[in-house]
Image (cartoon, grey):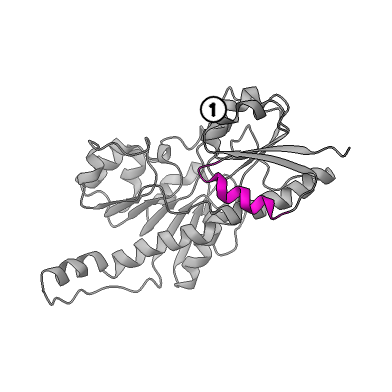
Amino acid sequence: MKHKNKLLILTDDPAAYTALISGLEFDDLEFFAFREAENAGPYIEDCEIILGEPSRIAPVLDAARNVKWVQSTYAGIEALVTPPKRTDYILTGVKGIFGPLMSEYVFAYILAMERHLFETRENQERRRWQDMPYRSLTGTLIGICGLGSIGRHIALTARCFGMKVWGLKRSKEAVPGVDRVFTLSEIAEFLARPDYIVITLPQTPETFYLFDEEAFQAMSPSAVLINVGRGTLVSEDALIRALKEKRIRGAVLDVFEEEPLRKESPLWGLPELFITPHNSAYSFAQDIVNIFAENYRRFVAGQPLRYAVDFDRGY
């Protein structure tokens, strides 16, 4: 009898993943899908593969004694790499699907702010006819913190608008579409000039509270901060002070130190701040299953899996 690999799916939408993976017709794959980990009890120990959201996988990882490979459905895999989590399996992330979605989000806000769309809507509600001068994006400067697949897509989108692009990353090598690359040791110089600063970095010990009092002091008073990376990269207390003291023009936050954002948080009441509920880029099931399918074929063939995570680096 042919051996079947056992796959455990832990996701908010098990029905969608069940339908899509059934359609792959992998004869050597047996799978079980659940929303809640406690319902997966009888299957956890025997599974060799887990597909799902890191926060759902983390509580059962120790019990999955035979697991060889975990495929995350999210870009953020902190729940699986924060010590002392296991590292005796292959963890793969997702790349190449969030760049377009996050570019749409970032430029929706940049264009809305440059063309005064929020103010124009308020004027419409008040029946006020008022011209609002604006500038072209051509020649404005965007600084992108993190030049992985998401940051690079944002950079190329910015070039389509004629913007100048600076980037911040671990190493100095050139990146297509980026005019100048800075390292973390040069962050003060990097922050000094951009009109928009976009964070796409992962959470690591190096990036925790990267945007603190000193960082906001280094930014231009006309700068807008857009965070689609991780909430822990920005000190919310420092950001609140920077906005209240008008040390920066504004901010757009899709991620927060604690989620969901508590109702009593002072962030809600800041007029220069726009808040979204961590939805700049959804993990659409079809996109994730496409990545899983390619990696499963590699897994069966004994080939290296795509988007493998370095546990030491955390990404």
Q: Position of residue 66 (x, y in %)?
A: 73, 27
What element does badge 1 sit on?
helix
Quarter of the image with the C terminus in it? top right
Q: Nearer the viewer, residue 28 or 185?
A: 28
Q: Is residue 179 visible?
A: no
Q: Give the farthest residue toward the front.
A: 1
Q: Residue at x 57, y 24 (%)?
A: 83
Vertical relation: 53 (above or below) 306 = above
Q: Residue at x 52, y 49 (%)?
A: 146
Relative horizontal placement of residue 63, taking residue 137 as reference (left or right): right
Relative horizontal placement of residue 23, taking residue 180 as reference (left or right): right
Residue identified by numbered label 1: 38
Count of marks overlaid on the render: 1
Quadrant in the rendering for residue 143: bottom left
Vertical relation: 39 (above or below) 175 = above
Q: Give the farthest residue toward the right.
A: 1
Q: Which residues are magenta?
A: 11-24
Whether residue 19 appears in magenta in the rendering, the answer is yes
Quarter of the image with the N terminus in it? top right
The amino acid beneath tag 1 is Glu
Relative horizontal placement of residue 180, taking residue 50 as reference (left or right): left
Q: Residue at x 35, y 60 (%)?
A: 195
Quadrant in the rendering for residue 239: top left
Q: Position of residue 167 (x, y in %)?
A: 50, 54
Q: Position of residue 75 (x, y in %)?
A: 55, 45
Q: Residue at x 60, y 49 (%)?
A: 17
Relative horizontal placement of residue 88, taking residue 140 as reference (left or right): right
Q: Nearer the viewer, residue 122 or 9?
A: 9
Q: Nearer the viewer, residue 197 or 226?
A: 226
Helix, strand or loop: magenta stretch: helix
Whether residue 144 appears in magenta in the rendering, the answer is no
